[in-house]
Image (cartoon, rainbow, N blue to C red):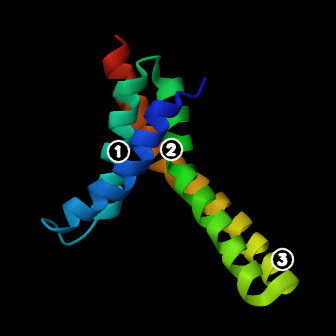
Amino acid sequence: MVKWGAVIVGFVLSLAFPAILDLFMDSWTSVIGLFLAGFVVGIMVKEGAFNGFWNATVAGAFGGIVTAILITILGTAVAGLAGMVTGAFTGIIMIIAALLFSMIFMGIGGAIGAAIAGY
């Protein structure tokens, strides 16, 4: 089951951690930041590795979903029906990419965090 409090916190942390780490490191900041955000979500969930993985993945994909909605709205406002279709197509591709990326990095961090916190 998705815990929306942990998902929202994870979404905010997935934006904040890479930006903070970028001040101190030159490379891999987005990957490490997403892993740490997923780890925090997993600790908040405390329901086993699979639920930590799932909640962290939803938190990571939430950013892609929000961006896809904004692109569709902006495309509709700028170019009408053609912009809406283009924005929706681009949004679907972004959601799939965000799901895969967050499953790899945030999901693994969430699974580790939930496994540590759950036992």
Q: Quadrant of the N terminus?
A: top right
What crowding class fits label 2: few (fewer than 14 Cα within 10 Å), some (14-19), or many (20 or more)? many
Label at residue 59: 2
Left or right: 4 with respect to 74? Answer: left
Task: In the displayed orientation, state which residue is furthest to the bottom.
Answer: 79
Could you say which quadrant of the image residue 84 lies in?
bottom right
Q: Going from the N terminus, do you reach mark 2 or mark 1 first? A: 1
Which mark lies nearer to you, 1 or 3? 3
Q: CA distance from mark 2 to mark 1?
A: 9 Å
What crowding class fits label 3: few (fewer than 14 Cα within 10 Å), some (14-19), or many (20 or more)? some
Label at residue 37: 1
Label at residue 77: none
Name the element at disc 1: helix
Name the element at disc 3: helix
Where in the figure is residue 107, as x and y percent of width and height? 48, 40
**Residue at figure coordinates x 20%, y 60% from the top left:** 21
Kind of residue sitting beneath label 3? Val
Q: CA distance from mark 1 to mark 3?
A: 33 Å
Q: Going from the N terminus, do you reach mark 3 or mark 2 first? A: 2
Q: Which residue is mark 3?
A: 85
**Residue at figure coordinates x 34%, y 10% from the top left:** 119
